[in-house]
Image (tube, rainbow, N blue to C red):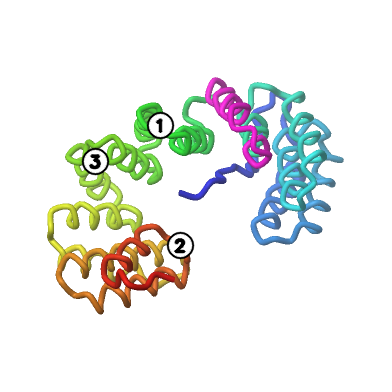
Amino acid sequence: MSWLSLASLVGCAATVPLPARAVALNAAGARAIAEGDLSAAEARISVALEYSPRFVEAWVNLGYVELRRGNFAQARRDFLKARDCNEDIPAPHLALGVLANLEGRGEEAEQSYRAALKVDPGFAPARVNLARSLYARGQYENAREQFERLVEANPEELEGWAGEAETLLQLGRAAEAEGVVTRARERLGDAPSLALLAARFRLAQGAWEEAEAILAPLVGGADRARAGAAWSWIAVARMGGGDGPGAVEAARAALAIDRDDPVARYALAKSRPERVP
């Protein structure tokens, strides 16, 4: 799982109406952050704050500019300013959690995510980050509960379905996990993350060729991490089907993307035990 989920919002739930120009500039600044143009982002958001000095999401976005620059102390000041302007908006709490996580303060990060959810239980980025943090700490049942709540509150949020299935697998409840993926695919279609999970279920059942057929379309595309995961599970499928050379080829393709991929290294060791890079 990736570790950073954040929200760069363009509106504000404050009681005082915001000037339309401030909203437009903040939105343009958020787009500039996404595009990596931090100088333009800072300029646009700063002008938005000149129009409305208590514009909560503009302060949050200005903090994200500093976060991207590695200026954690200034980012914290901006996030705290946003929270002080209005504690009843979830975005500043989320931002403080993201910062705490990056600084290695996991418990504080989780507290911030929970504070965001106390304001708005349907605020998906905070729920995602809380669930991921619990998962990373091995708190699988607690993580499963958070992913399940994400599904209930935001059924179109793919991360909730995939996360719930992953945690169920960690808990040894494969049949339940497969049921979650089946329902998710019926609702959301064959999203790549769901296809990866579906292929793993086929592998567990020994359906090697079927698993590889599901994985094959995932090895291309811009998402290299996903392509690497697909190659690693293809290696397992080929190994299970008795195709040693094919398994080595797939494992090496996965390791070319991520040389520490544990699934690929396992498949390579099993297929060529005499030599693992």
Instruction: Give x and y (percent) for residue 2.
Output: 50, 50
Looking at the rendering, the stretch of residues picked out in magenta corresponds to 99-119
Q: Relative to residue 129, is residue 88 drawn left or right?
A: right
Foreground: 70 or 25?
70
- Dot 1: what SS? helix
Foreground: 273 or 190?
273
- Dot 2: what SS? helix
Foreground: 192 or 265?
265
Q: Earlier in the sequence, mark 1 or mark 3?
A: 1
* Mark 1, residue position: 143
**Amino acid type, label 3:** Ala
Looking at the rendered image, the quarter that the C terminus falls into is: bottom left
Mark 1 vs mark 3, CA separation in Å: 14 Å
Instruction: Give x and y (percent) for residue 158.
Output: 38, 46
Q: How would you classify the magenta stretch by its main secondary structure?
A: helix
Q: Relative to residue 35, is residue 48 drawn left or right?
A: right
**Amino acid type, label 1:** Ala
Instruction: Assess disc 1: are there few (<14), some (14-19) or many (≥20) residues with their C-alpha within 10 Å of its C-alpha.
Output: many
Above or below 115: residue 39: below
- Dot 3: what SS? helix
Instruction: Give x and y (percent) for residue 198.
Output: 23, 54
**Amino acid type, label 2:** Ala
Instruction: Give x and y (percent) for residue 91.
Output: 63, 33
Instruction: Assess disc 3: are there few (<14), some (14-19) or many (≥20) residues with their C-alpha within 10 Å of its C-alpha.
Output: many
For residue 23, which quarter of the picture?
A: top right
* Mark 2, residue position: 225
Q: Earlier in the sequence, mark 2 or mark 3?
A: 3
Mark on residue 126?
Answer: none
Mark on residue 177?
Answer: 3
Q: Relative to residue 246, is residue 252 drawn left or right?
A: right
